[in-house]
Amino acid sequence: MIEQSESQRDGVWAHPYQLACGQTQCHQLGQIRLWVSLEKREWQVRHELLAPDADPPAWQESLAQSPPSTDASLQRFIRPDNDQGVVLYRPAMAALPTVIRPYQPLTIPAGGHCVLYVGTSLWIQVCSGSQQLLALTELPLATPSKTWLGANTMQGEICYASATYGRLALDAVPIRPWRAVTPVTINNRREKPLLLERFSLPTPLLSLHRNERGQLWTPGVVVECETDMSSASLRIEPSVTEAAGSCELIAPAREKLAKGRSLVRAFDHIFG
Amino acid sequence: MFDELQNTLMQIIGSIAWGQWLAAGFLLLLGVVLGTLLARSAGKLTEKRISLHHQVMIRRLVFYLIFIIFAMAALREVGFSLQVVLGAAGILTVAIGFASQTSASNIISGLFLVMEKPFEIGDLIEVNTTIGEVVAIDLLSVKLRTRDNLYVRIPNETLIKTEVTNRSRFPIRRVDLVIGIAYAEDVERVKELLLSLAEQNTVCLEEPKPFVLVTGFGASSVDLQFSFWVVKEEFLEGRGAMMIEIKKALDRAGIEIPFPHTSVYAGSHSAPFRIQLVEPEQQSDKDLPNADKNA
């Protein structure tokens, strides 16, 4: 399973990479460049930000004999005795809910429903160790931008703003190794049409799954809008949609939904 | 004479029930120790569930409750009847009330403050000209730690009477920047430039939307108000970073931020000012602005 990295190639999530003492592994993924160096007694993690509008389609990974000479910001971690120089990269969803918008406001007729495919940016967790994983640090793969979702400026919650739009066709969603796809089904059970301008996706509650093509997916989210927008309820499906193909779980959700706690309360402001 | 005095003193000392007083003292001490311990445990128990403000309130309540129970037991031990003590306390209250009006007023103001809860421990508040983080809400006063790390005590009565601004009540805050641009500049272009800065800056929230207003035609500049929203913790950072970015962007775009200046106009009916250029007389090097270049 553990194998020695060679020259430049595609990086893989949750794959154990073996480093020798003094070696540096370089990654270019999303909007960051990351270097992980193994020293005798420590791990060194450096990163620098690329242009905020960069949209690289692949994850490039390569080995170097020395750390970069750039002014990348450095973090140092004491190395546990039994990590055997193994490093692994785990994806993580955003720690705050993410506000999604369709390309243009979308009207769902009374009694109708729609499925929006949403790509959300991930965070990378650098973990060391082969038997017992030790999370060293976590970095956003795209510079997150924040927004406020609430009825007024007094009540509401701080969310991340999604850099991409929700799409009605799966083919239109740009698939990237640093983004996960979530299918969001919105059922309008009201007697009036529903104008969908933006909604909050509960990203901290979503787990990450990888399909056979290496794409990352999360379980689907179903929003039921019954009387008015403030009483919409939200449900996370137990498994990944069939469109993703067969998937394996690679990262659990950041937060577990407490028993007996309804998602309506947890995400009071589904629609802005 | 001296012997008689000594005998009397010995009789008085002998008649005091030392055992009872010792027991009462012990009870008081036990009350303090137990009260502190229980208050601390209550605080720890509720640590994760409630805010720091409520935690401190619960701790204080538990402490005073236990201490009062033990104090009453101590009084009973030395033979005071509780009814007499309470009766005496009634008379004492009137006497003490007159003597310590300020303290009493502060205590009552403190109770109202706790009930009304205009701020909590950890909030950033502004009272008169003092801005600071609330570190304690006590019986008589509220303690603030200012941004330059000074400890400020504000009597509760002052807080009840004056205007208090809580700067951290709501999760987001608006930053208003006033920018003056030269009359010759295109206001629409500056507006677009500022809004694009807000879009690029990650500290700046996307919603509520940032906006630019023309607030007036000043003496030397057209005054604009540039407003955007930030998370309350990032207020200072957001404002500072945005001001640097605005200066850079305006410089890049060649937009002038004018300093106050005055144009002297003689009017159409009066003759223009007569200006004559004269050669400078011999000047010492010190008077020249760039003496090195001229040397």
Image (tube, coloured by chain):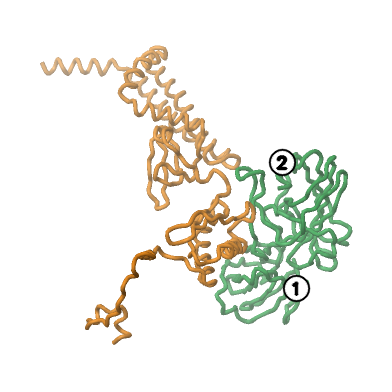
Other residues around mark 1 within 10 Å, as few (<14) / some (14–19) / many (≥20): some
Could you tell whether A123 is left or right of B14 in the image? Answer: right
Q: Position of residue A105 (x, y in %)?
A: 77, 54
Q: Is residue B12 left or right of residue B118?
A: left
**Which amino acid is tagged 2?**
Arg
Outermost residue to the bottom:
B295
| Residue bearing mark 1 | A58
Comparing B39 with B293, the one in front is B293
Q: Position of residue A77 (x, y in %)?
A: 58, 66
Q: As displayed, is residue B252 above or below residue A192?
A: below
Taking depth in this image into account, of B69 and B92 the one nearest to the observer is: B92
Residue at (82%, 44%) from the top-left corner? A224
**Residue at figure coordinates x 76%, y 68% from the top left:** A177
- Residue annotated with mark 2: A265
User: In the rendering, at what x and y percent does residue A135 appear?
Assistant: 65, 62
Task: Give, as a three-letter code, the residue at label 1.
Answer: Ala
Q: Quadrant of residue A216?
A: bottom right
Q: CA distance from mark 1 to mark 2?
A: 38 Å
Instruction: Say which colour chain A has.
Output: green
Position of residue A64 in the picture relative to residue B122 (left or right): right
Q: Quadrant of the N terminus of chain A?
A: bottom right
